Amino acid sequence: MKYVLLTRAKKNVGDFLILDRAKRLIKKYKGKDFIVLQSWKPLDNYLKIINDSDAVIICGGPGIQPNFYPNVYPLIKNLEDISVPIILFGIGWCGFPGDDVSLKLFRFTSTSLMALRKICDSYPIISCRDYLTAKVLVDNGFTKVLMTGCPSWYVLEYLDKPFKPPDKIEKVVFTVPQRVNYHGQAIGVMRLLKKMFPNAELICSFHRGWRSDKYTSRMEAERLSSLRRAALNLGFRVVNAAYDISKIEFYKDCDLHVGYRLHGHIYFLSYRKPSFLLSEDSRGIAFSKTLGLPSIQAWELSRLGEFYSKLIGNVKLPFTIADFAESMRRRLVKASYRAVNELKQLLQKELESGFEQFNDLEKVFRKHFEKVVRFLKSLP
């Protein structure tokens, strides 16, 4: 028998990394084959394939959003037609900006609640990738939650390897932000890296590339191309890492990652290399809090945003009002003017200490990995 794996892997290389490592884990601990389907497309035409499998596994990704079903995961029109368990493996919360107020305002739509209850009826345990996601789920009535981490955290042959600080910083990878409002800040970060590591090879990696296609609009591509030109002018080598995890295998030969892409950060840490994340939203914040690692908050609220957050942060709001309140608050978020200097101070501190905050990395990953194995072995 086999599993049906649902993946969000469209263009972002991080989603392909999640799928690759999920497949490796499932193969090792369940010994099953899989059929991979695209999770963002309706699956009605695949119903027979689904019901002939042992289970449907939704692999990772920031799927815990108000419109979980049918916008993020359309699945099929009538969920009762799926006769096998639907399993969430390493699912994550995606919120912007992702602070405590975002947590308090989070609500699922009625259709999303219905779908999640159906999923929990078919298999009761939800595997999530961080403690903030666990809190979101518990606060919304889903109590059987296991924090396993994301499948992308785990490289089997590196599980017992301790962190080893690099002798020299000769190759530095910078990953660009997803949101355009951080582009100016990103250029400031590249200037900082050029100044701090003048003799290192500097590489600017675009996890979603910079060219327009069916997943990237022409306007977005123009903005990314402008950021690419800025990187080239600063002396960075640029890499289009979209669609294929083999394009980031060179990370293994690099000494340091600094940037915005969570799965660039995770890739380095999974190979026990130092990495510093600028958190764009809840995904980075949640990861850093869960592992107890240093990170920089890339955003800040305007004064009006701070006032508005205090106004609505302690009020229990129904879904429609809460969703509107959070969408209004997003407009009051801007790139932090302090982030580059905070990053400089953090880098200097860690360079001087030999990256001591990463010394327990192996123990943290190992502790959570034991829960992954327990979860996978419990699957049908």
Image: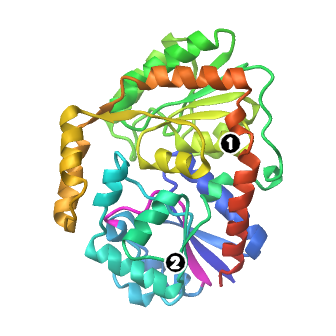
Label 2 or label 1, whichever comes before in sequence order: 2
State which region is magenta: 53-67
Residue type at the position of mark 1: Leu
Q: Badge 1 is on which residue?
A: 269
Quadrant of the rendered image containing residue 266: top right
Q: Is residue 55 magenta?
A: yes
**Front-most of 177 and 353?**
353
Instruction: Compare residues 232 and 198 and report the one nearer the observer.
Output: 198
Q: Quadrant of residue 351?
A: top right
Vertical arrangement, residue 373 with respect to residue 308, above or below: below
Q: Which residue is mark 2?
A: 144
User: Which amino acid, by three-letter code, is at mark 2?
Assistant: Lys
The CA distance from mark 2 to mark 1 is 28 Å
From the viewer's perspective, is 256 left or right of 79? right
* Residue 5 horizontal/vertical position (percent): 58, 70
Residue 77: x and y in percent read: 34, 80
Tell me the SS state at disc 2: loop
The chief SS type of the magenta part is: loop
Q: Residue at x 29, y 76 (%)?
A: 111
Residue 128 in sight in this render: yes
